[in-house]
Image (spheres, rainbow, N blue to C red):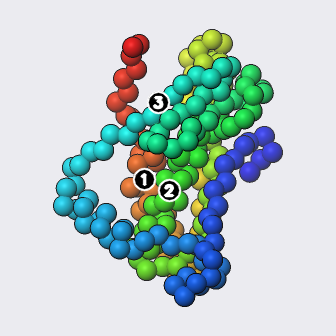
Amino acid sequence: MSQNQESIVLTGCLAPESADTPAGTLAPINKEGLDALIATGKANPKAIKTLKCKTVAEGRFRHANYIRNLPAYIVDEPPGLLGDDTAPNPSEASLAALGSCIAVGLHANAVHRGWTISKLELNLEGDLNITAVWGTGDVSEKPVGFTDVRIAVDMECPGVPKAEIEKLVAHVTKWSPVANTFIRPVNLAVTAA
């Protein structure tokens, strides 16, 4: 990574040593729960779930995002973009969502294959032109949003060859909902209430 590029790094929590989890391994997800989700998905492969978020402007460029019954997820801008630097900016949050989605997929697929994870870290970088200043600046023809995103996956599974991990990364990327949101066009409707 160059010094001029920012990155988002996602790292895993190691499980406390127990009879079921060896020391130095990632805390596993529930295999029975995963199997139930797999069965449900296979039984109804066309099921659609609608996710919701309410975004409330708090002042300047700080926003509180309300999802389910969770505490507010804050999004802000850095000082260079006139924000208070209290939280990730929207583009950084989208990188975090992308990295988290791929990490979830890697974890679920590793558990499904019976692999133990000793390390799972993703380094993400995204390039975007910000000169349009949200449509108030230079609005000459240019790509808006990320033009390039790079993800480096550092995953270690004892006894699993690197080639198998590489195949898993490709498989998970293909089936990641957030990666597919980045890759393919999506229908977007924005209306004034």
Q: Label 1's element?
A: loop
Q: Is residue 156 above or below residue 133?
A: below
In this rendering, position of residue 127 left or right of residue 190:
right
Q: Which residue is mark 3?
A: 54
Q: Label 3's element?
A: strand
What's the residue at 60%, 28% (across, down)?
63
User: CA–CA distance between discs 1 and 3?
Assistant: 23 Å
- Identify residue type, mark 2: Ile
Locate residue 181, reporting x and y percent. 43, 41
In this rendering, position of residue 43 left or right of residue 181:
left
**In front: label 1 or label 3:** 3
Front one among 187 and 66:
66
Which of the 4 image quadrants contains residue 73? top right
Q: Which residue is mark 1?
A: 176
Mark 1 neighbour density, 10 Å: few (under 14) some (14–19) many (20 or more): many
What's the residue at 42%, 53% (across, down)?
176
Which of the 4 image quadrants contains residue 139? top right
Locate residue 121, reporting x and y percent. 63, 62
Q: Which residue is mark 2?
A: 102
Q: Earlier in the sequence, mark 2 or mark 1?
A: 2
In this rendering, position of residue 42 left or right of residue 28:
left
Task: Please say if the residues under marks 2 and 1 sit with CB atoms less than 8 Å apart.
Answer: yes
